């Protein structure tokens, strides 16, 4: 008679009963492990049963007791068919797994939210904190000893760093990498600086519909993140500056390159090595010096203004660093840090050029005199030791892309922070991306748009009362005023001025701007105009504003007493509309947020202002405000 095994065709594997494994079933032996499969058991009131059940289910995937005894390396899978910036995630996961297995670990991938800029309504920023919560809670909930977080598109890396620091298990970011540049009529193009410049040419009538369709085909010719120094590339470089990436290629290897796959395989090995280090949790490994290095990198690459918001959110997740760095720190570091990397939008080149020029290895060696070399890195070495053991020999091409300290692209202060009566908590400007530097010291009459809809309606009106010396002001695109703080701060040049050849104007808003964009643009006014106490909220057409970048001033030239009257009147109207309704009048979002349901309600009630990072107050290291 056939045995059961013959009947089913299955084999009986050789299996020795390991003493450590059999202990899992020993009811007299308490289960209190904080590592591997035995950590963080599901609550059933009986730990042995919880472990027994966990093993039952994971064995359904074919794992053996022996494999399950290895250190478990989680791999966060952010693949989505709506996210071309993460199109290579499946290949990266395979490569990471190879590295983990070769080093004696057990790789287990799991999904979290994936966010792409163009497929997130209202904005990707609206969802960043949700992704950070997903990341934090899934790292905490699942039995992982370390986690490789695969991210790349603008908001994904910040969300993962925020969540990873809060979860405080060993983490290693893995960047998806930049896309390759495309080519239109022999000219290199790349998302998304060239998206904007070509769209501006099309609006101004300089190119026709066929031209713009050709450009549309070539701006993103491969998967991967935007190929200029936009927010995604900036966050990748900053992550290397924090000491969390391999210096050769970790930030810059192209998404579609074999180098990127090798970076991923090495990340698998590095995760196992990280487990053997003391102080391997992000709240121990990352110190204030790590973040100061990240800010030095941000200034030296002429990075995205968005990165200021993201870095503040990341910093404020870290219990020992929160409160020790603010926007003034960014400005102070900027004054001492030259812009060295010649990439769009501040310069002329693409991320692949930066990689070929030596990437972050070349940059960090160049920046060495300015860096805090005692900061610890992912491999346990200090940054100074890591640079000593990974030398870089500069060559001519390299020096064109990564300039030397004595031949910078811009002497200092690529990103500046301005203060004044309309931005008492600060405003941010990428001074290095100004196309008309006379605007860095400018006094002008303002043309106010109350919100994006108002702007869309009037910006191209031939009768718009505006000259090239006017200052364009756009309100209600802050964190609460337009949930998700859209990247609408690059207010278009009014068509009638564009057709006269005006390429740049001073533009001010409480919103954000794509890291790939350029111009003389002041962003992140804090507090935002939706705040009923905000001075920015009561700027009126015809007021005058003075911008003095050298002295970091941005002032509305209106008497304090007049501003106080305007604020009082706005509040009176807001409360009256909110309680009784007034025909044709829009209710103020600042008052309406307490009535909303779902994630939008959570977002509007909890999001803090841009100078703090637009995080939810209750997620910061400090936790919720006592009144909430
Ligand atoms: Fe993903 Fe630009 S849209 S990096």
Image (cartoon, rainbow, N blue to C red):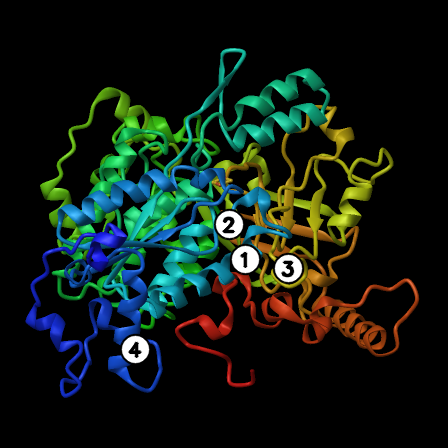
Q: Are marks 2 and 3 in contact (CB under 8 Å)?
A: no
Q: Distance of mark 3 from mark 4, alpha carbons?
A: 42 Å
Name the side, left or right, on which 499 lies relative to 56. right
User: Which one is in front in this view, the residue at disc 1 or the one at disc 3?
Assistant: 1
Disc sitting over residue 429 in the figure: none
Quadrant of the snapshot with the N terminus: bottom left
Residue occupied by mark 4: 50
Residue occupied by mark 2: 115
Residue occupied by mark 3: 483
Please, what secondary structure does the residue beneath circle 2 have?
A: loop
Q: Upstream in the sequence, badge 4 or badge 1?
A: 4
Front residue of 405 and 456? 456
Q: Are marks 2 and 1 in contact (CB under 8 Å)?
A: yes
> Which residue appears at 12% of the width and 60% of the height?
276
Residue 47, quarter of picture: bottom left
Q: Distance of mark 2 from mark 1, alpha carbons?
A: 8 Å
Residue occupied by mark 1: 127
* Above/below status of 568 relative to 436: below
User: Which one is in front in this view, the residue at disc 4 or the one at disc 2?
Assistant: 4
Q: Distance of mark 2 from mark 3, alpha carbons?
A: 16 Å
């Amino acid at each position: 008679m056939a045995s059961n095994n013959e009947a089913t065709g299955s084999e009986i594997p050789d299996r020795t009963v390991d003493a450590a494994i059999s202990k899992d079933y020993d009811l007299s032996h308490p289960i209190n492990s904080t590592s591997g499969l035995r950590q963080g058991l599901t609550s059933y009131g009986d730990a042995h049963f919880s472990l027994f059940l966990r093993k039952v289910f994971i064995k359904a995937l074919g794992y053996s007791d022996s494999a399950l005894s290895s250190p478990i390396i989680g791999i966060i899978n952010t693949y989505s068919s709506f996210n071309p910036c993460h199109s290579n995630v499946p290949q990266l996961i395979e490569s990471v797994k190879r590295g983990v297995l070769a080093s004696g670990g057990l790789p287990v991938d799991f999904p979290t939210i994936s966010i792409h800029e163009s497929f997130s309504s209202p904005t990707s920023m609206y969802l960043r904190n949700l992704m950070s919560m997903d990341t934090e809670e899934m790292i905490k909930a699942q039995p992982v000893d370390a986690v490789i977080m695969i991210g790349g598109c603008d908001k994904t890396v910040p969300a993962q760093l925020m969540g990873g620091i809060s979860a405080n298990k060993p983490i290693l970011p893995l960047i998806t990498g930049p896309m390759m540049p495309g080519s239109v009529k022999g000219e290199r193009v790349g998302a998304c600086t060239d998206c904007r410049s070509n769209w501006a040419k099309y609006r101004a009538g300089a190119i026709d519909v066929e031209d713009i369709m050709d450009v549309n085909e070539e701006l993103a010719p491969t998967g991967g993140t935007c190929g200029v120094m936009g927010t995604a590339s900036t966050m990748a470089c900053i992550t290397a500056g924090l000491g969390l990436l391999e210096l050769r290629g970790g930030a810059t290897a192209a998404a579609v390159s074999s180098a990127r796959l090798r970076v991923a395989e090495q990340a698998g090995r590095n995760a196992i090595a990280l487990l053997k280090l003391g102080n391997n949790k992000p709240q121990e490994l990352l110190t204030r010096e790590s973040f100061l290095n990240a800010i030095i990198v941000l200034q030296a690459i002429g990075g995205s203004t968005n990165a200021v918001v993201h870095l503040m959110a990341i910093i404020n997740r870290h219990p020992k660093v929160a409160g020790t760095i603010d926007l003034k720190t960014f400005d102070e570091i900027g004054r001492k840090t030259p812009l060295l990397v010649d990439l769009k939008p501040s310069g002329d080149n693409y991320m692949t050029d930066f990689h070929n020029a030596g990437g972050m290895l070349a940059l960090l060696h160049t920046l060495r005199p300015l860096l805090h070399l005692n900061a610890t890195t992912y491999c346990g070495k200090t940054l100074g030791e890591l640079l000593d053991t990974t030398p870089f020999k500069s060559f001519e091409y390299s020096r064109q892309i990564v300039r030397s300290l004595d031949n910078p692209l811009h002497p200092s202060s690529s990103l500046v922070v301005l203060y004044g009566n309309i931005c008492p908590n600060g405003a941010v400007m990428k001074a290095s991306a100004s196309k008309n530097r006379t605007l860095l010291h400018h006094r002008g009459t303002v043309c106010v748009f109350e919100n994006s809809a108002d702007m869309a309606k009037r910006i191209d009106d031939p009768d718009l009362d505006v000259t090239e010396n006017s200052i364009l002001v756009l309100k209600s695109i802050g964190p609460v005023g337009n949930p998700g703080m859209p990247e609408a701060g690059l207010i278009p040049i009014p068509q009638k001025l564009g057709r006269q050849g005006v390429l740049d104007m001073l533009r001010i808003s409480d919103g954000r701007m794509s890291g790939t964009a350029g111009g003389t643009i002041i962003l992140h006014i804090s507090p935002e105009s939706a705040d009923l106490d905000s001075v920015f909220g009561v700027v009126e057409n015809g007021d005058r504003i003075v911008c003095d970048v050298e002295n970091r001033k941005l002032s509305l030239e209106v008497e304090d007493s007049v501003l106080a009257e305007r604020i009082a009147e706005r509040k009176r109207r807001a409360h009256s509309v909110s309680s009784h309704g007034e025909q044709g009048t829009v209710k103020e979002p600042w008052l309406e947020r307490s009535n909303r349901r779902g994630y939008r309600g959570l977002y509007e009630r909890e999001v803090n202002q841009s100078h703090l990072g637009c995080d939810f107050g209750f997620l910061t290291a400090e936790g919720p405000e006592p009144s909430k």
